[in-house]
Image (cartoon, grey):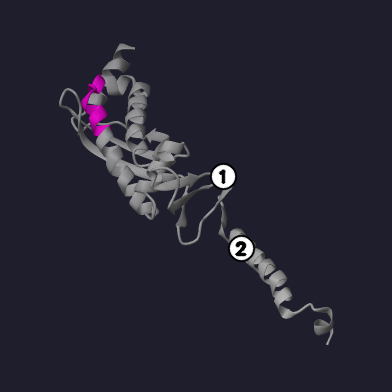
Amino acid sequence: MWIAQTGFGFGAIALIVVPVLLVLFFLSMLVRQYRRCPSNRVLVVFGKVAGKRAAKCIHGGGVFVIPLLQDYAYLSLEPLTVEIDLTQALSKKNIRVNVPSTFTIGISTEPDIMNNAAERLLGLNENDIAAQARDIILGQMRLVIATLSIEEINQDREKFLDLVNKNVNFELNKIGLEVINVNIRDITDESGYIEAIGQKAASEA
């Protein structure tokens, strides 16, 4: 036979074919394990990662996920709207105010804050994330209002908004979120004190 005549036996063929097949197999594994990250998501790789971190976060680009040693999941960067129905918040002079607000929040792409999101929010749905954010926002708004008088809240609403934004953002960062926008819809009190201040200012104008 031709193989016998040339001395080119099955063993020699195997020495060529098997390494080629192994290379093709590993290349296909690499292709399958390469994960790209869309611009509206954060790719979280967890398991055995470099350093002392529990997970590695990627925004944009891609990364190889090592089989058996690592796994991956995504966090959405889509904004969340959180309605805050704050009532009876105690101000500095013990007058209770109502401050209904709308907060737009989202997962931050700042590296340290993004890692917080991977640790605190991975696996949660939008409702769970919004619930955590709502508790933080309500608490921080009450704290800010407690440091200001009704006059300060009513007359300098920009300052009030800045304080709320700063305090809320600082606490949200701890779980991986950031404030995108704040809309304070109204500021009222049941005693009518704010309305009386407005009427007095109008009469003196």
Residue corresponding to mark 1: 60
Q: Is residue 138 left or right of residue 166?
A: left
Can see residue 113? yes
Within the magenta stretch, is there residue 144?
yes
Within the magenta stretch, is there residue 98?
no
Amino acid, disc 2: Phe
Whichever of labels 1 and 2 marks the residue nearer the N terminus, that label is 2
Could you say which is closer to the camera, residue 56 or residue 68?
68
Residue at point 40%, 34% (across, down): 182
Can see residue 77? no
Residue 9 in the image: state x and y as whole percent.
Answer: 75, 79
142 in relation to 60, above or below: above
Could you say which is closer to the camera, residue 7 or residue 81?
7
Type of secondary structure dominating the magenta stretch: helix
Image quadrant where residue 60 sits: top right
Range of residues picked out in magenta: 141-151
* Residue 2: mark in rendering: none
How many other residues sit within 10 Å of disc 2, few (<14), some (14-19) or many (≥20)?
few
Q: Is residue 81 left or right of residue 25?
A: left
Residue corresponding to mark 2: 26
Q: Mark 1 against mark 2, which lies toward the viewer?
A: 2
Q: Secondary structure at mark 2?
A: helix
Could you say which is closer to the camera, residue 2 or residue 175?
2
Name the residue furthest top.
204
Residue 1 in the image: state x and y as whole percent.
Answer: 83, 87
